[in-house]
Image: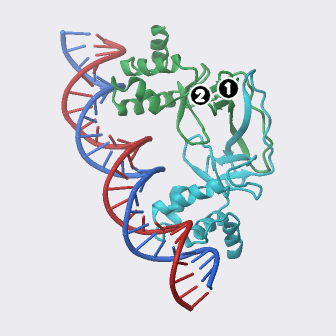
Chain colours: A cyan, B green, C blue, D red
Amino acid sequence: MTTDISNLLKRNQLSVTNSRKRILECFHKSDGALTHAVIEQQVGEEFDRVTIYRTLQTFVEKGIIHTIPTTDNSVKYALCKEACSEGHHHDNHVHFICDDCGTTYCLDHVTIPSVQLPNGFKHKQTDVVVSGVCEKCDN
Amino acid sequence: MTTDISNLLKRNQLSVTNSRKRILECFHKSDGALTHAVIEQQVGEEFDRVTIYRTLQTFVEKGIIHTIPTTDNSVKYALCKEACSEGHHHDNHVHFICDDCGTTYCLDHVTIPSVQLPNGFKHKQTDVVVSGVCEKCDN
DNA sequence: ATTGACCTGCAACTTTGTTGCAAAAGTTAT
DNA sequence: ATAACTTTTGCAACAAAGTTGCAGGTCAAT
């Protein structure tokens, strides 16, 4: 478990530090995506606000986590799959945000549909964010 | 033209004020979506920062404009189509952001594809944001 | 024109994110 | 294990983004 996390860091040429291990743990424990604020709340006493910002930035650059576009424009982060390499994200999955509990899921097995663009527009990436009610809140 | 704008405001039970008219003009003049910062830049000397924030909020509530999710999580706003009523947005169109010039387009004629959600997940809304190169920047 | 409701600007504040630098930790080679 | 080197952290200070309360001004309806 702890070695998994250490290996992930080493694989990305990052030194293994307490804050990085701790923040990665948060992601592994959580079902879904996390905001800076939530992480700060969970590890807040241990580490400085600035450290969390910088750690998240580093993780995004290295392809360990990715950001998720949201309609309310808060910044959410989630773990990338193995395939993501430095500087090249290809998290081609649909994101789902529950209107009830606010959890953001990465739906890895739902494929991104292709959209037909007007003439002259060249496609590079498609982000799909679905909102609704998740399995846990559905009664 | 000016009467169009006034009517739009009246139809939404909003009093017709200079700042509201001016901000709506900005949207009509522009091809695409606008950020708070861009609007402030265009009308900045005339109106207070706070007024712009509150005007945009009001417009979103009334269904005159809508927010657009972006991968860099900056807040962008664009005009809604006639169909949007108070508190109920249904801007079911694809958004396109040009990586080159940064312009955000509402592609009204591109239909939102339907996605197959896992069991237990209930769909309410789908947001699709495509990035790439737009017709103007494509050489 | 007067009244009442609504809108605006100002000031102060909170929240969010960034930068520079010195101290502390991690890493590598001996 | 230790020394030397590199990287990361915490602090402080700052910058940017967004919010709130209130007094004064504007708008709409009579």
The answer to whether marks 2 and 1 mark residues whose Cβ atoms lie closer than 8 Å is: yes
Q: Where's residue B9, x and y in %?
A: 46, 18
Q: Quadrant of the N terminus of chain A?
A: bottom right
- Chain to which the residue tagged by mark 2 belongs: B
Q: Residue A33 location, x and y as percent?
A: 63, 55
Residue at horizontal 68 percent and vertical 42 percent from the top:
A129
Using the image as rendered, state which of residue A47 and residue A37 is in the foreground.
Answer: A47
Q: Is residue A139 visible?
A: no
Q: Residues within 10 Å of mark 2 (few under 14, many from 20)?
A: some
Residue, disc 2: B103
Q: Residue B134: which numbered mark, if any? A: 1
The residue sitting at 59% across, 51% down in the picture is: A76
Mark 2 residue element: loop
Depth check, front residue: C28 or A54: C28
Q: With B69 as the anchor, is A124 left or right in this view? A: right
Residue sitting at x 81%, y 50%: A109
The quarter holding residue B71 reads top right
At which x and y percent is residue C28? 64, 75
Q: Amino acid at mark 1?
A: Cys
Q: Is residue A94 visible?
A: yes
Discs 2 and 1 carry the same chain letter: yes
Nearer to us in this view, D4 or A7: D4
> Distance of mark 2 from mark 1, alpha carbons?
8 Å
Q: How many marks?
A: 2
Q: Position of residue A68 (x, y in %)?
A: 63, 47
Picture residue at 50% right of the left edge, 27% below the top: B62
- The amino acid beneath tag 2 is Thr
